Image: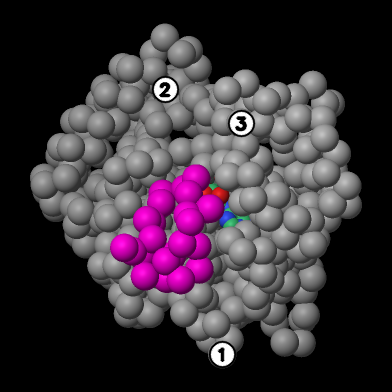
Amino acid sequence: MTIESQIDETEYERLAGGTHGDVLRPGDEDYKEARSVWNATVDRRPAAVVRPTGAADVIAAVEFARERDLPLAVKGGGHNVAGNAVCEDGLTIDCSSMASVRVDPEAQTARVGPGATMADLDHETQAFGLATPGGVISTTGVAGLTLGGGVGWLSRKYGLAIDNLRSVDVVTADGELLTVSDDENADLFWALRGGSGNFGVVTSFEFALHEVGPEVLFGPIVWSYEDAPDVLAHYREFAANAPRECTVWVNSVAAPPLPFLPEGVHGTTVLIAVAFYAGDREDGEATLEGLRTYGDPIADAVGPIPYTEAQSMLDDLYGEGARNYWKAPNFTELTEGTIDTIVDYATRLPTPESEILVHQVGGAVNDVSTDATAYPHRDTEYIVTVAARWDEASRDEECIEWVRECHDALAEDATGGTYVNFEAEREGRERNAYGENYDRLAELKRAYDPENVFHLNQNVAPAD
Ligand SMILES: Cc1cc2nc3c(=O)[nH]c(=O)nc-3n(C[C@H](O)[C@H](O)[C@H](O)COP(=O)(O)OP(=O)(O)OC[C@H]3O[C@@H](n4cnc5c(N)ncnc54)[C@H](O)[C@@H]3O)c2cc1C
């Protein structure tokens, strides 16, 4: 079936007539931008893209797609590495047109539109010295990040993004707008906190905020990769004893050409710890000292900077347009074997931009019980992202194979769980992603989306 045959002129007019926002089709000026996502291996061409101005447009678009049995995708920031935000043929709802953030400084809450990025959210909340946990790259969409869980520098102190959700407005598969919270439609609120895009189109999020910054301690400490086994073992001890204000992620990657690094190491594999501390400055300095003075670092650029700068400092390293493939096993501890595997695969990164990144989690994230939200991985202390990043399509197989092999080698000491937001495969990893909450999600899917209208995601099939 050709794209044009899915939505002909009459149908297009019907869709455009029912919505206030733009409806884009192949050939329209903004169509290319609307269908493009962060990961360049994803190249899908929807028959039409709706850019809603509000819930009414979202309802119209959902009904239009459902009645015609069209594939329906929903785009927030477009960062999903599996490319779940766009579909081939069918209809994409691109929420970038709904990016407002409204902060209530008294109540310490924020109302956030589904097209807002982390930059939008942090900018508005920090104007009042407030913040909520979210991603560490400012261009990531709040919507997709939150619906899968949402882990960042503040998570060990304040939990995941979903742990700070107070309520959500969502358009369900039958075109109904529901407000969900602990007090209203609580079962759907449970499912939305970790169930990814399976349950409807969110038109508004309400988050609790916390006092953060305006300055935090932040920055990289860099060691030669020869020292990696020793430093990673030390990091394991450091991380296990770190207070919740402190989060350190450790990356095995080729040194980028940054000014604080000696030119001689540019392009060589190094171990970079990215340290974050939100709290009393002196306590932060004292906490981080044990890591910063360990061994013989090549560089140390940790210092006080505004929280919003910390939240965007790494952006340039993760720009869009490259080809990407990720796998991300969870760990309750970093064993000797895991460290050995990381070091082994990091000595043969397929490209300088590829990496093996250890995310420290734990803390407040694990205060929440496994069945309290759909996100199940409440025992995870570390997520290890094995990420290949390259430019030429001719290298797809080689780069993907490196990730898969490394992932399989890491599996021995991993929990078997995977964070849905870091999963590059759309199919086959659903049980790993939703874990022991899968069956309850499937029951709720049957109740709220029995025809599986929202299936372009790591999908939960409606229970029989
Ligand atoms: C460079 C980079 C850095 C990242 N850093 C972090 C990080 O620090 N912490 C972290 O937790 N994750 C991080 N991620 C992963 C990120 O959480 C996921 O990629 C997430 O899917 C991004 O959300 P998005 O809105 O940008 O994505 P999109 O691709 O637009 O959407 C992702 C999924 O959410 C669904 N969705 C989007 N909007 C809606 C909506 N309004 N209603 C219902 N469903 C919707 C989509 O259908 C899709 O299934 C990062 C990703 C990248 C590429």
Viewer-closest of 181 and 244? 181
**Callout 2: helix, strand or loop?**
loop
Q: Residue at x 68, y 71 (%)?
A: 177
Q: Which residues are magenta?
A: 442-464
Q: Earlier in the sequence, mark 3 or mark 1?
A: 3
Which label belongs to residue 183? 1
Q: Residue 41, percent across and down?
A: 50, 25
User: Label 1 neighbourhood size at 10 Å, few (<14), some (14-19), many (20+)?
Assistant: few
Q: Main secondary structure of the magenta part?
A: loop
Nearest to the eye among marks 3 and 1: give it: 3
Read off the residue under disc 2: 352
Residue contact between numbered discs 3 and 2, judged by CB atoms under 8 Å? no
Separation of marks 3 and 1 at Cα, in angstroms: 38 Å
Quadrant location of the C terminus?
A: bottom left
Q: Earlier in the sequence, mark 3 or mark 2?
A: 3
**Callout 3: helix, strand or loop?**
loop
Viewer-closest of 252 and 176? 176
